[in-house]
């Protein structure tokens, strides 16, 4: 029983970390652009396909494939920012509609370009063996996801705290007009946020592809869970996002092991409803309008 | 001058209604009747999305509420042999309660949060229908749903009767929603959409208005879902999936943001567009979403007035043709 609990915890941690890789970019973009970038999941999906293309079709090393996925996702993300997102007013509902339109377009493009069948890729070389701690086993690829997730968390926090544009983005989240008066360009800040978000989505796409499968619809369920995690954690703080991801991951992991993952979804949905009633700004978030 | 008083929209609606009434007499094929029946289904549902969008809330759970109506009808009439009309009332009550339970917390938040709450609800309801195999038969769905029982000597055994039932339900639901849209209540909704803090300071109970609208819209969707069950006689969870709900949201925007007539126009497009596209060489049904996506991107970014704007422009063009001579005369006088 203890082993099962340990195993479930490890699985939950993997779910939480892969969720965090998607949610971090989503949270960053939401904070600055005030758009739930629903198409973030599709950028992630395109990153996965790019990874598949470079690693299996071109036969290059997976590390290079991840770089390819990151670059492609950044390009896509930057184009989305320069094109549609830049043209609409900062109205959350309209932003969602535009993102939804992009989702439809990108999913169909992926279906036309890569076909309807789902693709699978191998784990990274050197991470194919499972690591055993006592009776608890963890796949190498999953272990890699946890490590990268922690690195991304620390890196993003350092970036936000010490880098010039990290501080600039925080200022944009707090008060865009005052930030612009201080010489922080909203356009550049939004673009950088989208580029970082895209890079994280590409990274997630490359890392998660080996433990899952790739098809045109993998993005949307990730975005739904990631957005729930952001709501739980509260907007504007990566610590909050990781807390939200951990809560979601552990509920999903434990109910998936012991009961049924649908029950986990129901529990989380009710939890989010109750949270919105009593603490609309999330567990760690500050007040947002 | 008298021409200006004529409302082209009203004439078009009347013509369409007459066409719907006489369609079974002029064309006996099931194909067209089925197509028009799905149009009956879409109109109130898309209008519901429009009404919510007018308040600035994108209602992405219309599919979930339709499925609640449809499954209530299917399960209670098939497994328990209950009367369809009674079950329709039960489904209204059930949907009302669920919509209220979700509406109160979900409508406290605006914008993306509300989208998330409704989207999550749709996902949740779908997974319940898929997992609760004992009552909903899982992904295989429920088939052989019985036709409604006779009411006042009218039998509903023929497809034509089901067609007319759909027409009546559509007209009733649309009129209810139109009253909601045009009344004082509708004006309150519009003001909430523009500025909810200001509306609250003007004495509008924002929360009550929002919840009432949400519940009404959801009940209408559930009734149409119940109709869908008897129209198709089989239902599966995929008929009400998240992407269907997103389609309704998209088309409520494409029709013209917050426009009631626009929702009707866009329902027509939503129904006939896939049919029309079949005639394009090399067309594949998989390409449908990309066209929807381009539609909505175009409307939001380039032409915010949507289909209703196009139709109004066309209407003005027609009007100009009729009144051209008079206009020329007045122009002449002005130039002199």
Image (cartoon, coloured by chain):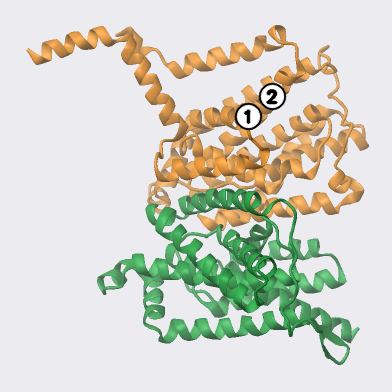
Chain colours: A green, B orange
Taking depth in this image into account, of A43 and B50 the one nearest to the observer is: A43
- Quick check: marks 1 and 2 in contact, CB under 8 Å? yes
Chain letter belonging to callout 1:
B
What is the secondary structure assignment of the residue under circle 2?
helix
Taking depth in this image into account, of B220 and B133 the one nearest to the observer is: B133
Chain letter belonging to callout 2:
B
Q: How far separated are the C-alphas under marks 1 and 2?
A: 7 Å
Residue B110 in sight here: no
Q: Position of residue A59 (x, y in %)?
A: 68, 71
> Mark 1 sits on what residue?
B271
Residue visible at 26% across and 73% down in the picture: A183
Give the class, few, some or many, for how many residues have Cα within 10 Å of label 2's Cα (few <14, many ≥20).
some
Give the class, few, some or many, for how many residues have Cα within 10 Å of label 1's Cα (few <14, many ≥20).
some
What is the secondary structure assignment of the residue under circle 1?
helix
Q: Residue furthest bottom?
A: A134
> In the rendered view of the protein, which quadrant contains the N terminus of chain B?
top left
Horizontal side of B95 relative to B59 (left or right) equals: right
Q: Position of residue A197 (x, y in %)?
A: 51, 69
Taking depth in this image into account, of A270 and B135 the one nearest to the observer is: B135
> In the rendered view of the protein, which quadrant contains the C terminus of chain B?
top left
Q: Position of residue A6 (x, y in %)?
A: 82, 85
Figure check: B299 above or below A277: above
The quadrant in which residue A9 appears is bottom right
Question: First in sequence: mark 1 or mark 2?
Answer: 2
Horizontal side of A197 relative to B156 (left or right) equals: left
Q: Position of residue B310 (x, y in %)?
A: 42, 28
Taking depth in this image into account, of B147 and A133 the one nearest to the observer is: A133
Horizontal side of B258 relative to B317 (left or right) equals: right
Residue B35, numbered label: 2
- Count numbered badges in the picture: 2
């Amino acid at each position: 029983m203890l082993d099962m609990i340990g195993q479930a915890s490890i699985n939950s941690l993997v779910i939480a970390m892969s969720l965090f890789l998607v949610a971090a970019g989503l949270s960053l973009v939401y904070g600055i652009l005030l758009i739930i970038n629903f198409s973030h999941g599709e950028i992630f999906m395109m990153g996965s396909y790019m990874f598949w293309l470079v690693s299996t079709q071109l036969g290059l090393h997976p590390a290079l494939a991840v770089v390819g996925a990151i670059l492609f996702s950044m390009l896509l993300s930057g184009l989305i920012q320069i094109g549609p997102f830049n043209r609409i007013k900062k109205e959350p509902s309209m932003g969602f509609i535009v993102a939804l339109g992009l989702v439809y377009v990108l999913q169909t493009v992926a279906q036309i370009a890569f076909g309807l069948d789902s693709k699978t890729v191998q784990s990274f070389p050197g991470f194919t063996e499972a690591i055993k701690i006592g009776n608890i086993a963890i796949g190498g690829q999953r272990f890699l996801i946890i490590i990268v997730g922690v690195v991304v968390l620390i890196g993003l926090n350092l970036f936000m705290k010490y880098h010039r544009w990290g501080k600039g983005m925080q200022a944009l989240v707090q008060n865009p007009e005052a930030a612009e008066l201080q010489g922080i360009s909203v356009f550049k800040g939004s673009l950088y946020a989208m580029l970082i978000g895209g890079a994280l989505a590409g990274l997630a796409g490359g890392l998660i592809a080996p433990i899952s499968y790739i098809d045109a619809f993998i993005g949307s369920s990730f975005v739904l869970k990631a957005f729930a995690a952001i709501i739980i954690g509260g907007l504007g703080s990566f610590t909050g996002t990781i807390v939200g991801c951990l809560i979601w991951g552990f509920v999903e992991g434990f109910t998936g092991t012991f009961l049924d993952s649908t029950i986990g979804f129901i529990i989380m949905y009710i939890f989010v409803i109750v949270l919105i009633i009593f603490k609309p700004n999330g567990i760690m978030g500050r007040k947002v309008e | 001058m008298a021409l200006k008083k004529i409302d082209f929209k009203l004439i078009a609606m009347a013509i369409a209604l007459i066409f719907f009434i006489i369609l079974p007499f002029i064309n006996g094929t099931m194909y067209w009747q089925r197509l028009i029946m799905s149009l009956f289904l879409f109109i109130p549902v898309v209008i519901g999305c429009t009404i919510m969008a007018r308040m600035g809330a994108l209602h992405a759970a219309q599919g979930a509420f339709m499925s609640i109506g449809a499954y209530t009808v299917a399960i209670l009439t098939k497994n328990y042999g209950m009367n369809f009309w009674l079950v329709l009332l039960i489904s209204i009550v059930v949907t009302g309660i669920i919509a209220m339970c979700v509406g109160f917390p979900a409508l406290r938040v605006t914008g993306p949060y509300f989208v998330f709450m409704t989207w999550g609800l749709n996902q949740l309801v779908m997974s319940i229908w898929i997992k609760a195999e004992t009552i909903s038969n899982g992904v295989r769905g429920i088939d052989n749903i019985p036709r409604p029982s006779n009411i006042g000597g009218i039998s509903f055994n023929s497809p034509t009767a089901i067609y007319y039932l759909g027409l009546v339900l559509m007209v009733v639901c649309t009129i209810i929603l139109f009253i909601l849209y045009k009344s004082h209540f509708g004006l309150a909704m519009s003001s909430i959409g523009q500025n909810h803090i200001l509306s609250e300071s003007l004495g509008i109970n924002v929360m009550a208005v929002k919840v009432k609208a949400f519940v009404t819209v959801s009940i209408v969707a559930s009734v149409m879902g119940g109709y869908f069950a008897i129209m198709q006689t089989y239902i599966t969870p995929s008929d009400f999936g998240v992407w269907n709900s997103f389609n309704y949201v998209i088309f409520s925007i494409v029709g013209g943001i917050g426009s009631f007539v626009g929702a009707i126009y866009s329902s027509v497009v939503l129904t006939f567009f896939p049919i029309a596209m079949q005639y394009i060489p090399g067309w594949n049904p998989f390409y449908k979403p990309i066209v929807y996506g381009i539609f909505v991107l175009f409307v939001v970014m380039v032409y915010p007035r949507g289909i209703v704007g196009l139709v109004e422009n066309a209407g003005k063009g027609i009007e100009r043709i009729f009144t051209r001579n008079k206009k020329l005369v007045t122009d002449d006088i002005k130039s002199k």
